[in-house]
Image: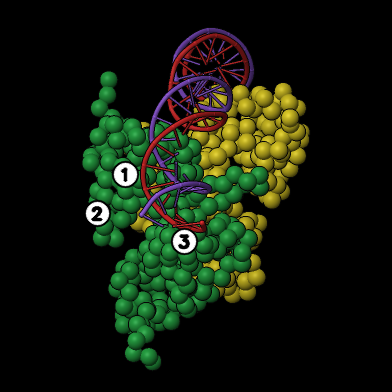
Chain colours: A yellow, B green, C red, D purple
Amino acid sequence: MNPHTIKVACSNCNLRELCMPLGLTEAQIQRIDDMVATRRKIKRGGTLFHNGEAFTSLYAIRTGFFKTCVATEDGRDQVTGFQMAGEVIGLDGIVNDRHTCDAIALEDAEVCVMPFDRIEELSREVTALQSHVHKIMSREIVREHGVMLLLGSMRAEERLAAFLLNLVQRLHTRGFSQSELVLRMTREEIGSYLGLKLETVSRTFSKFVDDGIVEVRQRHVRILNTDALKRIVNNQQACH
Amino acid sequence: MNPHTIKVACSNCNLRELCMPLGLTEAQIQRIDDMVATRRKIKRGGTLFHNGEAFTSLYAIRTGFFKTCVATEDGRDQVTGFQMAGEVIGLDGIVNDRHTCDAIALEDAEVCVMPFDRIEELSREVTALQSHVHKIMSREIVREHGVMLLLGSMRAEERLAAFLLNLVQRLHTRGFSQSELVLRMTREEIGSYLGLKLETVSRTFSKFVDDGIVEVRQRHVRILNTDALKRIVNNQQACH
DNA sequence: CGCGTCATTGATGTGCATCAAGTGGTGTGG
DNA sequence: CCACACCACTTGATGCACATCAATGACGCG
């Protein structure tokens, strides 16, 4: 093997604890290395897969940031999630062997391609992997419950506060700041995810700024008062 | 065995094609019979599991009708789904070994209790079962994408139309009418699911009645014009 | 530098929530 | 068997949060 080729495998990937199960033996890790068929790079704005496309693989995000969105026949669309490094994308395709949403890179990205038949094969033998796959899917279901709660019963400020807290928390587990973040998506995409129009997102940001809860410069956001955001989500804002 | 005890097992359950994989051998079906530990009856209004409770099992609904709901700390809650015979409930519990929502029977119900460790064990050996479990979870993810689309971008009429079409379609695959259904839930529960207040649900029903699209008497609904409902969902109402 | 994209802000409109009153069906106990 | 209470539902009047429409501003890129 070319000595300049960096061996890119789960076994020496610093995201392993995010996308793979813990407590594997050396031998099991070797086998999981084989599960990752290839890598794939996607340019900003490019699609990893789109609605209707045949499903073959799940994708573990190595670098970059994605959105997934579904669309109605009449053209409206809805961002169903934002995914970052260490997260797995493509679960929607399993049920009908076709993807039912689009996955679009919001910045240059690289993913590990994991053919699903290999995942199934290997998870029949490696219990920890089996359990891990189940948990990833269950986690997605629970996440979506949370989004349904947000869309079904929260007001604009609560939605945006919950969104910011969720993002910053996920970034924090990846070693980034607890209080500072760079949004990879537009106001319109945030709005689509949160069931709001972009103007409402913008106004709500401005309100948070006025209240001294965050600083916003373009897509750079600094959270000045995490507790205030949490109170907003829980509808307990110091009030009358 | 007592000859009066009806052998209630997957192998002779008429819902098998809904909750179990097809194309199993006789031997595999036998093993799946063993997966179902027990049955459990739940009275109308009773809970199958609730938020925070330890997760042990998935449940296949034999008879009856459930709702699942999540709640915020400040008491608001959101119905995340309605489940009927042949559907599997409890997937939310896998990720953290605790349930994260409540499952409440809307009418007297009976479920098959399937301990999850046995499911995992057996699905390591029976490929069709493994695949089936994956598809069930993926189907739930896709369903929730649809709900997010509904909550994030549809108006009241579209939401209710989509809800009715979905219900009647699921009932139809269970052998019921394509045009007539009995709602097992209150207007308030429908509203919670659809992100609307009960008054809005009621008014929207009334509007559909005025437009000759449905007949409503209490919880009995007869769909007079399925195409009109579909047009409403797709936002193509014969219009100006 | 000029154009396109994204964001902010203001003015106005509207769909649904809220508040409130009344109806009808159901179950219960006298 | 009827009277009553309770609950789910309907319908009307009003208000408000967010959408819509519109104008302007700030970057970033060719």
Mark 2 belongs to which amino acid? Ser
> Where is residue A102 drawn, in percent x and y?
42, 43
Quarter occupied by residue B85: bottom left
> Where is residue B222 drawn, in percent x and y?
27, 45
> Where is residue B25 drawn, in percent x and y?
31, 80
In the foreground, B3 or A63: B3
> Where is residue C3 drawn, in percent x and y?
47, 14
In the foreground, B133 or A238: A238
Residue drawn at x 35%, y 56% is A96
Residue drawn at x 43%, y 81% is B34
Q: What is the number of the mark on residue B95?
A: none
Whichever of labels 3 and 2 marks the residue nearer the N terminus, that label is 3
* Real-space CA distance between mark 2 and mark 1, rounded to the nearest whole angstrom: 17 Å
Residue linked to disc 2: B177
In the image, residue A115 above or below residue A43 = below
Find numbered disc 1 in the image and state the secondary structure of the residue it sits on: strand
Q: Residues within 10 Å of mark 1 (few under 14, many from 20)?
A: few
Q: Looking at the rendering, in which quadrant would you find the C terminus of chain B?
A: top left
Give the chain of mark 3. B
Q: Residues within 10 Å of mark 2 (few under 14, many from 20)?
A: few
Mark 1 belongs to which amino acid? Arg
Mark 3 belongs to which amino acid? Arg
Whichever of labels 2 and 1 marks the residue nearer the N terminus, that label is 2
Give the chain of mark 1. B
Question: In the rendered image, is residue A214 in sight?
Answer: yes
Find numbered disc 3 in the image and state the secondary structure of the residue it sits on: loop
